Amino acid sequence: MAVMLTIGLWGLDRGGMWGDESVTFQVAQRTVPQIWRLLHDVDAVHGLYYLLMHAVLAVHPSEVVLRLPLVCAATATAGLVAALGVRLAGPRVGLWAGVLYAITPMTGHYAQEGRSYALVAAGVAGATLLLVRAVDAGGARSWWPYGAVVALTCVLHELAVPVLGAHAVTLALLRVPIRVWSGWGRAAVAVALLVLPLVWVSQGQAGQVAWLVPPGWDRVERLARNFSPGPAGPVFWGALLLMAMGLRERRTAAVALPLLLVPPGILMTVSQVRPLYHDRYVLYALAGASLLVAAGAGRVAGGLGRVRFDGRRMRVGGRRVRALLGVTGVLALTVTFLNQLPVHRQDRSAAHRPDNLAVVSALAVRQMRPGDPVLFVPSVGRLAALAYPKGFQRVRDIALRESAPRSGTLWGLEATPGELRRRLASVDRVWVVAERSALDPRRSPPDAVERTKLAVLAEEFTVREEHVREEHVREERVRDDVLLRLYVRRRPGDTPAGDEPPREPAEGRPPGVSAGAPALTSPRPR
């Protein structure tokens, strides 16, 4: 837990939020009635998390406070994984499992992201520990804490429900008696009944994940590398080898293997018909990988402790052997962490996230004059103004009809196409905040207001060389640039705006889509 807390606090203030974090930040600062109204139309899956963060940000609204609960959740998860390892295979395996979980780059990434995934991982780890305790205790009362934790976790995010399938497989592998199945079954039914209304409501909001695609084998490989303490090289292959050896530890494997494979397997299978899978939705399955690797390392250590030297048998219980194995384990974990130190360091840069809304706001402060009109293309780009209003306080959002809190939406209601045309007709210059790909003249957005924005800019405005004041928000992982561009009303002979051809997207992704998250041109993720 100390290791995880240190890694979680390291670089917590990155100096900027990306899109999803900004949604949490601005929604959690609304009143409870405003949050409740929002959940009727969008983001019901995050309702409990928003209410929790509403209480947290009431203390002090800041980026660090936004992320602190996730750091604490990841710290608790590391401790719970260690406790699972102790219960299943002993103190040494438990310690190694907890530290492995803490130093895995994927854990550190989501420990510093203002979304619910680290909290869900803590809930699943706690529920799994309670499952093992309930199996050992055998009493009916021991299932109530288990059911309560699973229910709370699934309400935090409904895609934690597949953990019930993992626990069912665990019970089958352990060959538990009927009374255990009966206790678990009652708890599972209670969880299902509680979560069913949330699932029903969220199905009507499925458009939020319309950007997801059916996962292929490349996503399986990517998940395997994300779940490893090192995504490539000897660390990755060594982890796979230790996991294979850990399968021989029957009790540990019966708990860890289903947790590792069943939730991702269920979501990937369902996603072939209706895409619902993303790596972050199954962050909680990472605990299974850490347990298996630690179990394999424990088996290797046990074998080394029984090696004969000069005909004498060195037992694991001997002080020298225990000390040697302890030092070896510490060195191995330290070398693993140092090997991935560049990955951890890179992850603590705001540029490593899909977008940096703080930079967009800073550009607005430097470039815009009081009273200047600004147009967000598409409207989700308004998140920069909602998260960092300082840069947009002096300007006029020319398309906005009703603010996000008052309208019960994530980024506000915009004027109708006709009204927007009239508003734009009254100005001779307008600042546009957009990704370059969003201004592609070949695009035809499904929303009429977005089509009107592009049409008016192309027909009536231009970017003239002597008036260009353009800056880009360049980020390492962003596949396209966020830009702040000044458009002026077109004069006879001017080149129409938007004639600049778009750049080819990298790695076969749509323009503007970054690795692991949608860009401003994509629907909002869950």
Image (spheres, rainbow, N blue to C red):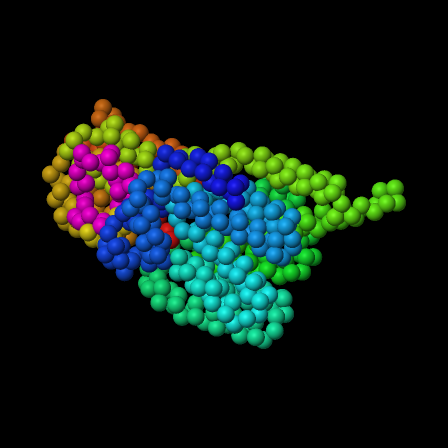
Give the quadrant of residue 511: top left
Q: Is residue 386 magenta?
A: yes
Q: What residue lies at 25% left-to-right and 27% top-to-bottom?
A: 366
Q: Is residue 397 above or below residue 154?
A: above
* Location of residue 218 in the rendering, given as x and y in whole percent from the top left corner: 54, 50
How many numbered marks, from 0 up?
Answer: 0
Residue 237, image x, y percentages: 65, 44
Write down the quadrant of residue 43 in the picture. Answer: bottom left
The residue drawn where x is 29% and y is 31% is 362
Closer to us: 165 or 222: 165
Q: Residue furthest top?
A: 466
Q: Residue furthest right?
A: 311
Whether residue 151 can be seen here? yes
Q: Is residue 439 magenta?
A: no
- In the image, the segment drawn in magenta is 379-405
74 or 385: nearer the eye? 74
